[in-house]
Image: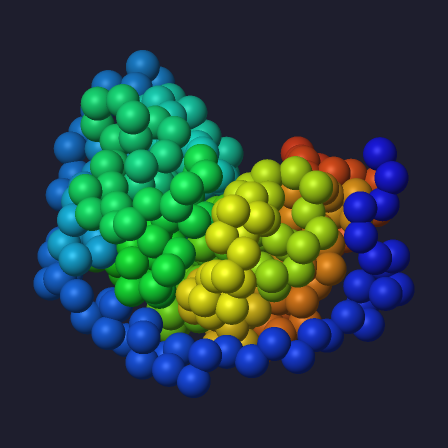
Amino acid sequence: MPLTDLTLDDCLAYRPEVPAPADFDDFWSRTLARGAAAPPVLRPVDNGLALVDTYDVTVPGFDGQPVRGWLRVPAGATGPLGCVVEFLGYGRGRGLPHENLLYPAAGHAHFLMDTRGQGWSAAPGGTEDPAPGPSGTVPGFLTRGVERPEDHYYRRLFADAARWTEAARALPMVDPDRIVVTGFSQGGGIALAVAGLVPGLAGVMPDVPFLCHIRRGAEIAPQPPYTEIAAYLALHRDRVDRVFTTLSYFDGMHFAARADAPALFSIALMDPVCPPSTCFAAYHRYAGEKAVEVYPFNGHEGGGRAHERLQLAFVRDRVG
């Protein structure tokens, strides 16, 4: 696979001047004020495992709409535990109760949010998107409600994620001061958004993050999901400025500039889905302590299992 974007030296020097909307902070304050917060509701489920306990969890998300997910903890744990809050990649849902055992096997709580309207959400027990807003004219989520930031799909999803992370602090077996957020691709973009919206996190691990420097992604990425934006604008030639104005409210660069938790990024130089310059644009803007692991000959899979070892060490260092 060839390089899909800039060389590493060029990426390290790439610092685009892309201003945030003037009302960015006010927009997100108003968004997160919608709907009253409430404690998470936990229901134990039989996962067939002896060493890990799983709970089906419901949390009020955007506008109070229910968001589902899993809590996994070492069997019999009473806490307080450090907690890894995880967000999922594009099109994925929360899966089955016995999946994703890495963090509970390491002794941490694992709080996995289902993504509204995606993946497993199509099955019973998933998170629906009951207020989808105006839909785009191409398949996918990037152009849903793209005419106005108030209607956009990712407004609802990022608000869900902020509420989900705050709910982790209310879990009886979790230490509220020892929470790390993470995610791969779309999940990495969501983790960056949460890092900019929720103070007091112990760490952030954006893994080949999506939704960073969105306009450049739409201009150069050869594979979806950024291609959804290009397809939409190929049909609606007069809406370019309006679309990118909306998407600027959801760009990881602007959340990164507001984040202060220690961060471990991963970026792959042959990534055709999240071109490395887009990820580096967010990395360079990140305001907190930060480190990046670069995978020169990998595509969107990034560091895979090898990177998980670094993430485990990062979590251990920050939550014990």
Q: Residue at x 33, y 45 (%)?
A: 135
- Seen from the viewer's position, the closer of residues 80 and 22 is 22
Location of residue 237 (image quadrant): bottom right
Residue 75 seen: no
Q: Residue at x 43, y 49 (%)?
A: 143
Q: How is the image coloured?
A: rainbow
Q: Nearer the viewer, residue 288 or 93?
A: 93
Residue 90 in view of the camera: yes
Task: Please determine whether, in this image, residue 49 is positioned above or below residue 270.
Answer: above
Q: Is residue 308 left or right of residue 298?
A: left
Is 35 placed left or right of 108 in the picture? left
Tell me the residue at 49%/52% (across/down).
236
Q: Position of residue 141 (x, y in %)?
A: 41, 43
Residue shown at 37% from the left, 82% from the top: 23
Q: Is residue 88 left or right of residue 293?
A: left
Measured as percent of width and height from the top left, residue 245 is found at 47, 69
Residue 273, quarter of picture = top right
Expressed as whole percent of the image width and height from the top left, the position of residue 138 reads 45, 39
Image quadrant containing the N terminus:
top right
Is 272 positioned to the left or the right of 196 in the image? right
Query: Residue 172: x and y, percent?
Result: 20, 50
Residue 20 or residue 82, whichever sits in front: 20
